[in-house]
Image (cartoon, coloured by chain):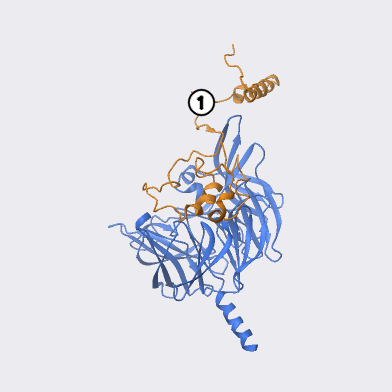
Chain colours: A blue, B orange
């Protein structure tokens, strides 16, 4: 009996003992226990279908935004209950927003909104505005104009609110074609890191992330991030990818080029011990599309292992709470599990519910 | 002289609404007028977005961007809800944001039980 208990403990540890929070259709967040390999709870959302999910820096709250009526819901991790929810829309006004970030105190939510007024037979779409939402008052309290050169940038509609908040809550780091540092009180620009000509010889036009917008992985330390980046050299314009490490407190960025860029890369997932990371490199398109797991050694900034993986047309890469398993999920109802050490397929979890592309929160 | 008259109940409601607002002496009565897409208004600098959902007509549902099917989700039912939720292909899936918000409420996994989805007639 004791031997069986030990075996069970070992097996559970290999699978990870953490919890996944997955936004799902039509309006809920699934709570998935890694150790048991099953859904253990389902948190119903009051305001509609979830479109983004983000963990607070202190890991006590989960912020979910919903699309039906442009709402925000706050989930308490300990009780798995929605402790705050409201919508921004009125019967004649919509405030469309995509993503954003809450300040460390949990009082304000920073995002970019676009007001849409419903007239008799048409919609009037207004310019995008930097917006501060008071989570206690449950309403928009301040808006500020977005400079035209910022709102005209590519992907602004989807990635305009790619914000990270500084640990003291005073600054907002806006990731796009450049890294813009804004004051959180009034969105005034205080600094900008020009990625067209980064401080690294032989590089220009740096873009963060391998997939859909910047992908910043929190390195379990407030203000510390690591991301993939793509750039090109100014002479031959050959594209290079590598790793970029940010310290939001000191505003230091360290670039470490690795090699030629593939066509695309998925999310960048870092293990909890910060020694390894993984992504899916994509080459080809449609019928010629092929995917590979790439494993990185973060101590030496090298690709250490590659393995082919059958990739879906749309998917998201995740990592287990202990860093030992890789998840491929999205555009569907299942999670494929791969062993991070061997990059081989292990099993598939059937969630019986389609998940949205809002992301995932993993808690140990 | 007014050259248009309401022929159905909805048009009559619109006429009544505009007349009521005008009768209340709203300063800018022109702002309450019904606007057609081709109505030439030199002062209008932004396009009029018709009531509905989106103006997206790009392929990606029946065929991918290359005109084939290799780029579609496999099976294609995996893509139903992600297309529906943001009103991304309003001609192919119902309008989630304005007219059919509960279309997917009867089934959670489209690939498995798409037969439970309602038919929507515009």
Please say whether residue A28 is visible from this viewpoint: yes
Q: Position of residue A312 (x, y in %)?
A: 45, 59
- For the N terminus of chain A, which image quadrant? bottom right
Subunit of label 1:
B
Q: Nearer the viewer, residue B92 or B87?
A: B92
Which structural element holds mark 1? Answer: loop
Which residue has dot 1 on it? B43
Q: Where is residue A285 in the image (x, y as percent from the top left)?
A: 36, 55
Quadrant in the picture for residue A296: bottom left
Please give the count of numbered marks on the rendered protein.
Answer: 1
> Height in image: A313 above or below B60?
below
> Height in image: A24 above or below B24?
below
> Height in image: B21 above or below A220?
above
Q: Nearer the viewer, residue A162 or A78?
A: A78
- Return the residue found at the far top: B1
- Residue A76 is left or right of residue A191, and the answer is right
């Amino acid at each position: 009996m004791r031997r069986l208990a030990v075996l069970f403990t070992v097996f559970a540890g290999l699978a990870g003992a953490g919890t996944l929070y997955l936004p799902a259709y039509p309006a809920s967040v699934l709570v998935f226990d890694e150790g048991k390999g099953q859904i253990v709870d389902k948190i119903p959302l009051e305001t509609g279908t979830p479109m983004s999910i983000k963990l607070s820096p202190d890991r006590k709250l989960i912020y979910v935004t919903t699309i039906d009526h442009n709402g925000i819901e706050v989930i308490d991790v300990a009780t798995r209950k929605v402790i705050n929810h409201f919508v921004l829309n009125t019967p004649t006004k919509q405030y469309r927003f995509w993503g954003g970030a809450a300040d460390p105190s949990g009082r304000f939510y920073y995002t970019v909104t676009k007001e849409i007024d419903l007239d008799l037979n048409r919609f009037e779409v207004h310019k995008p505005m930097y917006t501060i939402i008071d989570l206690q008052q449950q309403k928009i309290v301040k808006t500020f104009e977005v400079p035209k050169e910022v709102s005209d940038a590519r992907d602004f509609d989807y990635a305009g609110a790619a914000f990270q908040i500084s640990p003291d809550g005073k600054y907002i780091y806006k990731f796009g074609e450049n890294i813009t540092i804004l004051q959180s009180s009034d969105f005034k620009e205080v600094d900008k890191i020009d990625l067209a000509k980064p401080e690294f010889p032989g590089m220009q036009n740096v873009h963060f992330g391998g997939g859909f917008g910047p992908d910043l992985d929190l390195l379990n330390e407030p203000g510390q991030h690591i991301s993939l980046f793509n750039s090109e050299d100014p002479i031959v314009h050959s594209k290079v990818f590598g790793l970029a490490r940010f310290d939001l407190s000191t505003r230091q960025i360290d670039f470490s080029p690795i090699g030629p860029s593939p066509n695309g890369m998925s999310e960048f997932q870092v293990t909890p011990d910060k020694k390894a990371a993984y992504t899916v490199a994509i080459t080809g398109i449609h019928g010629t599309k092929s995917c590979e797991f790439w494993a990185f050694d973060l101590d030496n900034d090298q690709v250490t292992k590659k393995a082919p993986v059958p990739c879906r047309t749309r998917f998201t890469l995740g990592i287990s709470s202990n860093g030992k398993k890789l998840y491929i999920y999205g555009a569907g109802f299942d999670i494929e599990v791969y062993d991070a050490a061997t990059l081989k397929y292990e099993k598939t979890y059937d969630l019986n519910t389609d998940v949205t592309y809002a992301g995932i929160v993993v808690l140990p | 002289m007014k050259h248009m008259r309401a022929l159905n109940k909805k048009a009559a409601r619109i006429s009544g609404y505009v007349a009521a607002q005008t009768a209340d002496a709203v300063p800018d009565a022109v702002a309450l007028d019904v606007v057609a897409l081709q109505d030439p208004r030199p002062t209008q600098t932004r396009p009029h977005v018709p009531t509905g959902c989106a103006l997206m007509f790009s392929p990606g549902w029946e065929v991918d961007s290359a005109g084939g099917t290799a780029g579609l989700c496999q099976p294609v039912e995996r893509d139903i809800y992600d297309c529906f939720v943001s009103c991304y292909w309003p001609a192919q899936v119902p309008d989630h944001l304005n007219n059919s918000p509960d279309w997917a409420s009867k089934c959670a996994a489209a690939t498995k039980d798409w037969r439970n989805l309602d038919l929507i007639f515009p």
